[in-house]
Image (tube, rainbow, N blue to C red):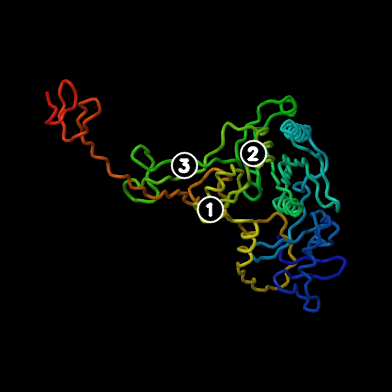
Amino acid sequence: MASSVYHVDLELELNLTEPDLGYPELPGLWERLRADKRPVPQRQLQCMQCREARPECPEWMFLTERDGVRFASHFNTTIADHTTGESDQHKAFKERIARAAELGGFTVEVEDRARDGRRRTDVLVKGAGDLMVGHEVQLAYASLASVKKRTKLARDDGIAPLWTTVDPQRDFINHVPWAQTDNFPWKYISEGGDLQIRGGVRTLEMERCNIKNPEPCPVRVRGKCGQLHGKWVSTFPYQLDDLVRDTAAGDYVPVIVVGKRLNRRWWVRATDRDQYADSVGGLITEEDLQRRRGLKVIEPPNPRPLDDECRYGQDSGIRTTPRPARDGDDADLPLITKVEPYVSLPPPKIQRYMCGAGTGPCLKSPARLYACGWRCEEHKP
């Protein structure tokens, strides 16, 4: 990573530590360069040292900003998004999803494209009412930024995206609605073999907090509170085919569960989502999270002199926050409690024994029990 870069077309040496890149006469230059989404070699950004001293070094660079720090990185084609060509396994997943939806009575469009050409969806399922679910099968590497961009394009078109993967460590897990299934060869998938969901789908279990429940009460330090406490558990056994049909029917819906360290995005039953919303005081939307991120104030870095040294392959010293488990550590999730109002029971009725003598019961009380039945003093044997 470098804090300086050379722009070939503009013939400018850009100092990324300066707010205006060292050229106050070109306002908005950083924003224009960051908005350039052409292939990296066409952006005309070169390593300043490699231009003359090290021609064998990959000299094309791209710009990045992280936590307010701007820097340029050498372009490495080995980690580029694989957007062309599909493996047999990828094709088998698409065919499996489409077949499952059609067997459920839903309309399917494979490789659906938006009119403006900006969006392409692997399998678009038209569900109940106006519901549309866009299935994206992502088996190869894709950057988180790319997945988020495609997710936004889908939402802008009124589509609920569902990203399917076989890798539990994919970068987009918990950043977009997702599901992880078993990893099998294409032939097994095409022939209808079981594809269990291993992540991304949860069920809300409510348990009474009483002496029969060995779990400690999350509300009281000691004892039991008598209310219902909930926890999210993996939905298992549960098949990919079932998820395709249930999401199209609206029985399973996406939800954002806000944690202390990590926000989870799961598919849950609609009834579980509503019960969760009642417990925590409402649901968080993507727009809410976007506004929260916009409130963060990042201090600008201190400007430094122009640096033309190439640091390709060197340790930059910039570290991202360690990533927690993708979808397993639920210790930071909010408490889910269903408070039931206390209902007092009516006092028990005092049974008064009455005489049953005569053609019609005497009904006098008090009465005593004899061999012939209940009798008052007047009718006792």
Question: What SS does tag 2 mark?
Answer: strand
The residue lying furthest to the bottom in this view is 25
- Amino acid type of disc 1? Gly
Q: In the rendered image of this protein, does residue 136 appear above or below residue 259?
A: above
Quadrant in which residue 57 is drawn: bottom right
Query: Along the horizontal axis of the image, is 95 left or right of 232?
Result: right
Query: Earlier along the polypeptide chain: callout 3 or callout 2?
Result: 2
Mark 1 is surrounded, within 10 Å at the Cα level, by few (under 14), some (14 to 19) or many (20 or more) other residues, namely: few
Question: What SS does tag 3 mark?
Answer: strand
Q: Which residue is mark 2?
A: 180
The residue lying furthest to the right in this view is 9
Q: Nearer the viewer, residue 203 or 350?
A: 350
Q: Nearer the viewer, residue 12 or 270?
A: 270
Query: Along the horizontal axis of the image, is 29 left or right of 251?
Result: right
Q: Quadrant of the C terminus?
A: top left
- Amino acid type of disc 2? Gln
Q: Which residue is mark 1?
A: 259
The residue lying furthest to the front in this view is 359
Q: Which residue is mark 3?
A: 206
Q: Could you say where residue 203 lies in the image, as x and y percent from the top left?
A: 54, 40
Quadrant in which residue 84 is drawn: top right
Q: CA distance from mark 3 to mark 2?
A: 25 Å
- Amino acid type of disc 3? Met
Q: Are marks 3 and 2 in contact (CB under 8 Å)?
A: no
Query: Earlier along the polypeptide chain: callout 1 or callout 2?
Result: 2
Question: What SS does tag 1 mark?
Answer: loop
